[in-house]
Amino acid sequence: MDSRKLVGVPLILIALIVLTDVLTPPNVHLGPLLVVAPAITASFASPRLTAAIGALAIAAEVLVGIHDGAFESLNVQVGLGGLVVVSLLVVLFAMVRDRQRRELTQVRSVAAVVQTALLRPVPERLGPLHLASAYLAAEAEAQIGGDIYAAVRTPHGTRLIIGDARGKGLPAISEAATLLGAFREAARRSTELPDLVADLEDSFDLTQIQSDAAEQVYAESFVTAAIIDIPDERPVLSIVSCGHPPPLLLRQGVVISLDASRPAPPLGLAPLCDPQYVPTDFPFEQDDLLLLYTDGVIEARDTKGTFFPLEQKAACWTGEQPAGLLKGICDDLLAHVGGRLGDDAALIAIRRIAEA
């Protein structure tokens, strides 16, 4: 609510306290209650307005003391001194709060810029593909996280990635940025999909050693990802899944889970198992819809602990364009969890259309 509408509350309190004190016997002093006015004002108003209300409360205390003929009494003097001290403290509090609010606004602005640079929305059209993307943050204040997606146009088609970095916070963001940068560079350079995934794997180190006095701290880092290649000339798509949930193919009201025949481990874990990146091909014909998503979607729970039924909900939107599909799923997802996700969620929808 606008602070200008709330300013009437402390003014009314001051008036009521003064009026009550005037109507009560002189030996009853209600002046100390005036401290409530600047204290309340500090919770919503600027330091300047808080100081003004504090000054008005001090003036009211002086007038009440004079009216009662007890201005020079110890009780009134102590009450007046306490009111002055509290007013100064709440003004200081308001100043600190406003400074922190400005810093938070600046941090959010920087986060929004970083989010735009790191996780750009996919283009609406790439060759014979119509695309849309969506990102839902678990926290309203957090604009960036470890969920990633990107689409890159190549001479022969379109390549996409969707992934989820392990953990949260700055380490996850760093891993996400590393992977996105490697994908955007290698997607155009690597001629075969397995070579592209191998290049992405090379962008990661399994362990990051941090020195802390005499001990060494080892931290694993990995990213689950699905890397997709969609050629322009053939109605197929190729997928290499690195520990990521399978994409969904929506065709004429039917939802098909595209499970890779030979999934690989998450990116960053290659030194543990010497993986083989073998693509799995699936038909992807005109008017088919492909839905890519992170585990924040399928692991979302309602108040009863029930997981979000993505396949069931997606079947209701198979006739939509990509943007409409994502809007319907995101609305259903937020309704399922009561408006607040427990984990970030990213989605991409792709429809193959007739090339103009």
Image (tube, rainbow, N blue to C red):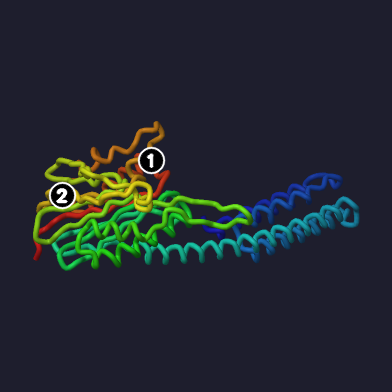
Instruction: Name the image quarter holding the C terminus.
Output: bottom left
Q: Nearer the viewer, mark 1 or mark 2?
A: 2
Direction right: furthest residue: 73
| Residue at left offset 22%, top offset 45% | 260
Side of 248 where 103 appears, left or right? right
Q: Residues within 10 Å of mark 1 (few under 14, many from 20)?
A: some
Nearer-the-camera pick, 55 or 179: 179
Direction top: furthest residue: 304
Looking at the image, can residue 164 be seen?
Answer: no
| Residue at left offset 56%, top offset 53% | 216
Nearer-the-camera pick, 283 or 270: 270
Q: Residues within 10 Å of mark 2 (few under 14, many from 20)?
A: some
Q: Are marks 1 and 2 in contact (CB under 8 Å)?
A: no
Rounded to the nearest whole Å, what is the CA distance between mark 1 and mark 2? Answer: 34 Å
- Relative image position of residue 81 (x, y in whole percent): 82, 57
Dot 2 falls on a residue whose secondary structure is strand
| Residue at left offset 84%, top offset 57% | 66
Task: Name which quarter of the figure residue 354 lies in.
Answer: bottom left
Sequence order check, earlier mark of 1 and 2: 2
- Relative image position of residue 148 (x, y in whole percent): 35, 56
Dot 1 falls on a residue whose secondary structure is helix
Task: Name which quarter of the figure residue 309 lies in.
Answer: top left
- Relative image position of residue 143 (x, y in whole percent): 43, 57
All told, the count of numbered labels is 2
| Residue at left offset 43%, top offset 52% | 221
Residue on which the image places disc 2? 281
Which amino acid lies under the numbered mark 2 shown in the image of this protein?
A: Asp
Which amino acid lies under the numbered mark 1 shown in the image of this protein?
A: Val
Q: Which mark is residue 337?
A: 1
Q: Which mark is residue 116?
A: none
Looking at the image, can residue 168 be seen?
Answer: yes
Nearer-the-camera pick, 210 or 112: 210
